[in-house]
Amino acid sequence: MDGEKKSNGINRIIVYLKASIEEMKKVTWPTKKETYNYTLLVIFISLGVALFLGILDIIFTKGLEYLIINR
């Protein structure tokens, strides 16, 4: 009985791996140019978000300092 469970588990893993390989063959991979453009887009968006959050941090810090000093 125990040997059947192991065999069944191994068969399920093999079926899963074969199905995964078949699905990977269907994937449309981006070209080099698309990958380059997407990378630049991610970098610039990340820099924009960092700048925005940095400005908010400065504003909130100055506001909190003002509240503490003028209390």
Image (cartoon, helix red, strand yellow):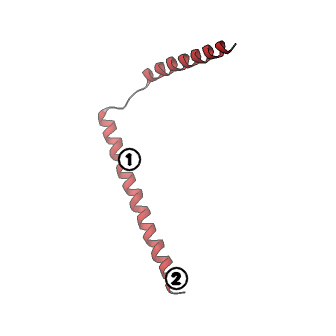
Residue 53 placement: quadrant: bottom left
Query: Residue at 40% of width from left, 59% of height from top?
Result: 50
**Dot label at residue 68:** 2
Image-based side of 5 in relation to 32, left or right: right
Viewer-nearest of discs 1 and 2: 2
Query: Residue at 58% of width from left, 14% of height from top?
Result: 11
> Where does residue 46 sit, x and y in percent of width and height?
39, 53
Image-based side of 2 in relation to 32, left or right: right
> Where does residue 16 sit, x and y in percent of width and height?
54, 20
Query: Residue at 44% of width from left, 22% of height from top?
Result: 26
> Where does residue 32 sit, x and y in percent of width and height?
30, 34
The outermost residue toward the right is 1
Q: Amino acid at mark 2?
A: Ile
Label 2: which secondary element: helix
Disc 1 designates what residue?
Answer: 42
Is residue 61 depicted above or below 30 in this figure? below
Mark closer to the chain start, 1 or 2 = 1
What is the spatial separation of the Cα atoms under label 1 and label 2, in whole angstroms?
38 Å
Residue 8 placement: quadrant: top right
| Nearer-the-camera pick, 45 or 10 | 10
Is residue 57 depicted above or below 70 in this figure? above
The outermost residue toward the bottom is 70
